[in-house]
Image (cartoon, grey):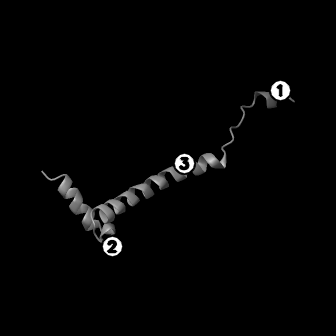
Amino acid sequence: MSEASEREPKRRKTSGWKIARRIMVPIFLLLALFGGMVVGYVVLGKQDIGEAFKWSTWKHVYDLVFAP
């Protein structure tokens, strides 16, 4: 080996698994959030699943929780 190659900093290898994990974790968190909302609204609340995806439903829930 030459002196120049010994002095160069070694490049770190980024594995595909690390990148995939950084992408998959937020996706799984969002799926868990939506799944929990739907299960809570449909199963526990005994409401129609179609209403679980309406913005007005969650605005109403927010208003009930954070009412002055």
Which residue is at a point 15% across and 53% down the rendered structure image? 67
Quarter holding the N terminus is top right
**Mark 1 against mark 3, which lies toward the viewer?**
3
Q: x, y (%) of residue 54? A: 30, 69
Badge 3 is on which residue?
22
Disc 2: which residue: 50
The relative height of residue 53 versus residue 31 in the rendered view (above or below) is below
Count the labels in the image.
3
**Mark 3 belongs to which amino acid?**
Arg
Question: Alpha carbon of mark 2 to alpha carbon of mark 1: how far?
Answer: 68 Å
Residue 3's label in the rendered image is: 1
Around disc 2, counting alpha carbons within 10 Å, would you say few (fewer than 14), some (14 to 19), or many (20 or more)? few
| Amino acid type, mark 2 | Gly
Circle 1 crowding by C-alpha within 10 Å: few under 14, some 14–19, many from 20? few
Mark number, residue 40: none
Q: Residue furthest left?
A: 68
Instruction: Name the residue type under label 1.
Output: Glu
In the foreground, 4 or 30: 30
Picture coordinates of residue 11 (x, y %)? 70, 37
* Number of the front mark, 2 or 1: 2
| Residue lying at the far right of the rendered structure | 1
Secondary element type, mark 2 = helix
